[in-house]
């Protein structure tokens, strides 16, 4: 299993490679192998939003883990909770909903700041779901779809970019993932004595995506065109409903940002101001 630095190198080298046609079969084989290498015959928690990335990971985990449970974090009635229930039903897997409230989000932010030293409001907001999974799951092994957006050009900001511009932006985001996000998550996992696995950052998966060529992953202005190579893999695996899931950022899909905004309104302060206040509290 590799980290984001390997992916940075491969994305950067794409400009030297001629596009190759390996198809979704090769990508599925690489992803299947990465998941199996991580969690075969282990009790495994899947950080699960019900979307495309975690859905395809869960499909493989179901086949190779000793026991597997899907953990979804969200406020009551949130987008991710609804999507997770329908996807869990399609997968035929056990789902645990970890409900978040204003009080639980505040406690989470304080604890994350204390454990990791992270002060960036954006990072803290999208890391809330994984924090709750690490804190609440019974399993020691956690697997996540982290890295799929960077690897498959899943962000809306990539729309309209082509060639070198797209490669450079993807490499920049993969570098941020490697230098900021992954170290943060490692600290959280170690605090709760868990281990997080990142199959989308596996060396063979990155190679398989690289072989597709940049044109095969460049997104058009259509939600279902983003990460289309991964959607083809989901279809190949027989999960057609999961293959058409649209992306929603973790902090919005889980409802955590809506709770944060309400907290800020009630306190008459900005989100940045709230984080500054919590950082001061943690230092005391």
Image (cartoon, rainbow, N blue to C red):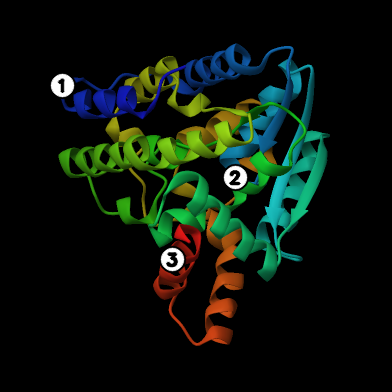
Cβ atoms under marks 3 and 2 closer than 8 Å = no
Can you tell which quarter of the image residue 152 is in? Answer: top left
Q: Is residue 238 visible?
A: no
Question: What residue would you read off at disc 1?
Answer: 16
Return the disc, 1 or 2, that comes first in the chain's sequence: 1
Q: Secondary structure at mark 2?
A: helix
Residue of label 2:
130
The front one of 29 and 277 is 277
Give the labeled residue for mark 3. Answer: 280
Which residue is at 74% across, 29% downward? 139
Mark toward the start of the polypeptide (3 vs 2): 2
Mark 1 crowd level (few <14, some 14–19, many ≥20, 10 Å Cα): few
What's the CA distance linking mark 3 and mark 2? 24 Å
Asked if the residue at tag 2 contacts the one at tag 1, i.e. Cβ–Cβ closer than 8 Å, the answer is: no
Q: Pick whichever of labels 3 and 1 is earlier in the sequence.
A: 1
Give whichever of 65, 163 is nearer the camera: 65
Identity of the residue furthest to the front in this view: 284
């Amino acid at each position: 299993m590799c980290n984001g630095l390997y992916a940075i190198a491969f994305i950067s080298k794409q400009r030297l490679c001629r596009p190759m046609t390996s198809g979704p079969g090769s990508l599925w084989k690489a992803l299947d192998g990465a998941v199996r290498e991580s969690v075969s015959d282990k009790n495994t928690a899947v950080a699960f939003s019900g979307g495309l990335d975690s859905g395809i990971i869960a499909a493989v985990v179901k086949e190779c883990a000793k026991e597997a449970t899907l953990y979804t974090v969200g406020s009551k009635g949130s987008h991710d909770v609804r999507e997770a229930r329908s996807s869990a039903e399609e997968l035929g897997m056990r789902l645990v909903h970890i409900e978040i409230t204003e009080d639980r989000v505040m406690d989470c932010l304080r604890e994350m700041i204390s454990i990791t030293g992270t002060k960036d409001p954006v990072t803290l907001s999208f890391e809330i779901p994984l924090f709750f999974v690490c804190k609440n799951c019974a399993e020691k092994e956690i697997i996540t779809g982290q890295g799929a957006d960077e690897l498959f050009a899943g962000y809306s900001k990539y729309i309209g970019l082509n060639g070198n511009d797209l490669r450079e932006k993807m490499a920049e985001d993969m570098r941020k993932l490697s230098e900021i996000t992954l170290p943060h998550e490692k600290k959280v996992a170690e605090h709760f004595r868990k281990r997080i696995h990142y199959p989308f950052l596996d060396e063979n998966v990155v190679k398989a995506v690289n072989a597709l060529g940049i044109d095969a992953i460049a997104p058009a202005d259509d939600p279902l065109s983003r990460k289309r190579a991964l959607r083809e893999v989901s279809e190949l695996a027989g999960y057609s409903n999961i293959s058409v899931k649209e992306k929603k950022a973790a902090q919005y899909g889980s409802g955590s940002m809506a709770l944060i905004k309400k907290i800020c309104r009630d306190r008459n302060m900005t989100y940045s101001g709230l984080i500054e206040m919590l950082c001061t509290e943690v230092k005391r």
